[in-house]
Each structure stands twice: as C-alpha cells, then as structure tokens.
Image: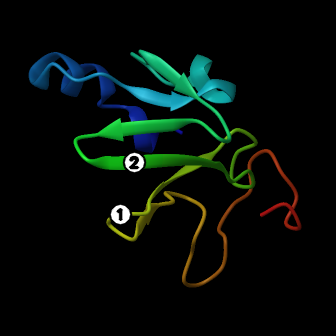
Amino acid sequence: HMDHVDANLALKERFKLRIVGPEAEKAKIPGIDETVEEGSVLHLGNERIEVIATPGHTAGHVSYHLPLSKVAFTADTLFALGCGRLFECKPPVM
C-alpha cells in the first residue's frame, strides 16, 4: 500500500538505493529494481536474508528473516491487537 512505498522514488534518488520487493506486488511498488518470492535469498554484508511468503494483508506480501541477527521484518503480518483490514485475503489466510 502507498503508506509503505510512497517515498520510494525520492529515497531511491537521494540515497542511490536499489528497491527489492515481492514479484507478485511489483506493479504496485514504485521504483522496484529486483523482485523476490518465497525461498529467495538476499545478502547484505555478512547477513543472509531469507524471503518468506506471508499472504494475508495483501496476497503477495513477503517477510524478510535475518537468521544471523535473529530478526524478521514482517511489516503488516504481525499485529499486537488483531490484523486490521484485509484487502485481498480472508482471515484464515492471515
């Protein structure tokens, strides 16, 4: 959704960034340079970044797991007080 990607082009230009996002959502992500899907692996320095499909809030949503750092970037997948609005999937998928 735009609340996550609205500044992509400005950030990309200012900081000379590459934008990586899910293949299934590429038409919705401005400035995307590289797409990933379930099972893709990225590397950043010594860090391995594993891509995990986590549909629910949107059908093509992915999360990024960094096992070395023991963190995951889940965006709109984990919620403390419910899952909010579902735009493309039913609650059981979430």
**Residue 29 place in picture, x, y as percent:** 50, 24
Q: Which of the pair 16/57 is nearer the observer?
A: 16
Report helix, strand or loop for mark 1: loop
**Residue 68 place in picture, x, y as percent:** 35, 63
Rendered position, 1 above or below 63: above
**Residue 24 place in picture, x, y as percent:** 69, 27
Report helix, strand or loop for mark 2: strand
Q: Are marks 1 and 2 in contact (CB under 8 Å)?
A: yes
On the image, numbered disc 1 is attached to which residue? Answer: 68
In 3D space, how far apart are the residues under numbered discs 1 and 2 (Cα atoms)? 7 Å
**Label disc, if present, on residue 48 of the rendered structure:** 2
Quadrant hosting residue 33? top left
**Residue 6 place in picture, x, y as percent:** 37, 31
Q: Amino acid at mark 1?
A: Leu
Residue closest to the far left: 14
Total labels: the figure holds: 2
**Badge 2 density bin: few <14, some 14–19, many ≥20, Cα 10 Å:** some
Q: Quadrant of the N terminus?
A: top right
Apparent side of residue 51 relative to residue 30 in the rendered image (left or right)? right
Residue at 57 percent across and 75 percent down: it is 79
Residue at 41 percent across and 34 percent down: it is 5
Q: Which of the pair 40/11 is nearer the observer?
A: 40
Looking at the picture, the colour scheme in use is: rainbow
